[in-house]
Image (cartoon, rainbow, N blue to C red):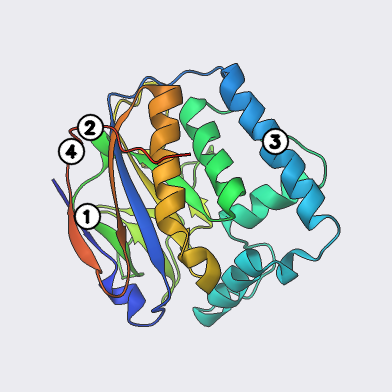
Amino acid sequence: MIQFDIGEVVERFPAFRVGMVVATGLRINSGRPESLQAQITEVERSIRDTIGDLPLGDVPELGIWRETYKQFGVKKTSFRSSVERLVKKVRQGDDLPRINTLVDAYNLISLRYRMPVGADDLDRIVSPVGYRIARPGDTFIPLGDPTGADDPPLPGEVVYADGNRVMCRRWNWYQDARSAISTGTTRALLNVEAIEPTSATQVERATAALAELLADVCGAQTTWQVFDAKHPSGALERPASVARIES
């Protein structure tokens, strides 16, 4: 059982909502099944058709993260939310990168609902977990950094962290290497985030869709729940069955 809390963050950002998925029994492959590829191709086409040449800052689900970052001190334009970076990549004609079935699946959900989505290896996580303000002594090792150098968050920065480390800096900007998903991961903790008012009402649907997709492409058993200002904390428990929604 993992204790989860966003209370410190929703005091300042009360519109924030996050869906948390616990997935077990995962079978993660490096290849991409045809059913997943078909859905990815469709959502890539949809992004290109619906956003077109619109400035990304004018897309409500993306622009609000820019403004939110500014509120905790992020000024550089090089720091963008994970979902904006995905949208930008797809809009310029690139395909979603092929990582593995779990990462490809959550990137699909991120694009479809225009929400930041991430995942960490549950066996590398130490309770408690949550979103909070950065603290002295926090550590962060950027995923993919060959030096493995510590790059700790700045004072006032919103982070996603467990009991030992920061797992994602600047809310949803970049992931720590120490809890990254691999093909050897059998249990994962996934997060689906929204702060824009309209998309925040869709967190339940996006989270349930993610859980169902993981069952389909990774053989997962899942449980999920949503946390917000009215329900800022609770326990994340091991799933007993697969969570599904009607299409």
Within-10-Å neighbours for mark 1: few <14, some 14–19, many 20+: few
**Gap in Å between the C-alphas at discs 2 and 4?**
9 Å
Can you give x and y, in whole percent of width and height, for residue 240 in the image? 17, 33
The label on residue 42 is 3
| Amino acid type for the residue under numbered disc 4 | Arg
Residue 170 in the figure: left or right of residue 140: right
CB of mark 1 within 8 Å of CB of mark 2?
A: no
For mark 4, give the secondary structure.
Answer: loop
Can you give x and y, in whole percent of width and height, for residue 124 in the image? 27, 38
CB of mark 2 within 8 Å of CB of mark 4?
A: no
Residue 177, above or below 65: above
| Amino acid type for the residue under numbered disc 2 | Ser
The label on residue 241 is 2
**For the view shown, which residue lies furthest in the front direction?**
246
**Gap in Å between the C-alphas at discs 3 and 1?**
39 Å
Q: Nearer the viewer, mark 3 or mark 4?
A: 3
Which residue was labeled with disc 1?
A: 163
Nearer-the-camera pick, 194 or 118: 194
Which residue was labeled with disc 4?
A: 238
| Amino acid type for the residue under numbered disc 1 | Gly
| Amino acid type for the residue under numbered disc 3 | Glu
Q: Earlier in the sequence, mark 1 or mark 2?
A: 1
The label on residue 180 is none
Q: Earlier in the sequence, mark 4 or mark 1?
A: 1
* Residue 141 visible to the viewer: no
**Gap in Å between the C-alphas at discs 1 and 2?**
27 Å
Within-10-Å neighbours for mark 4: few <14, some 14–19, many 20+: some
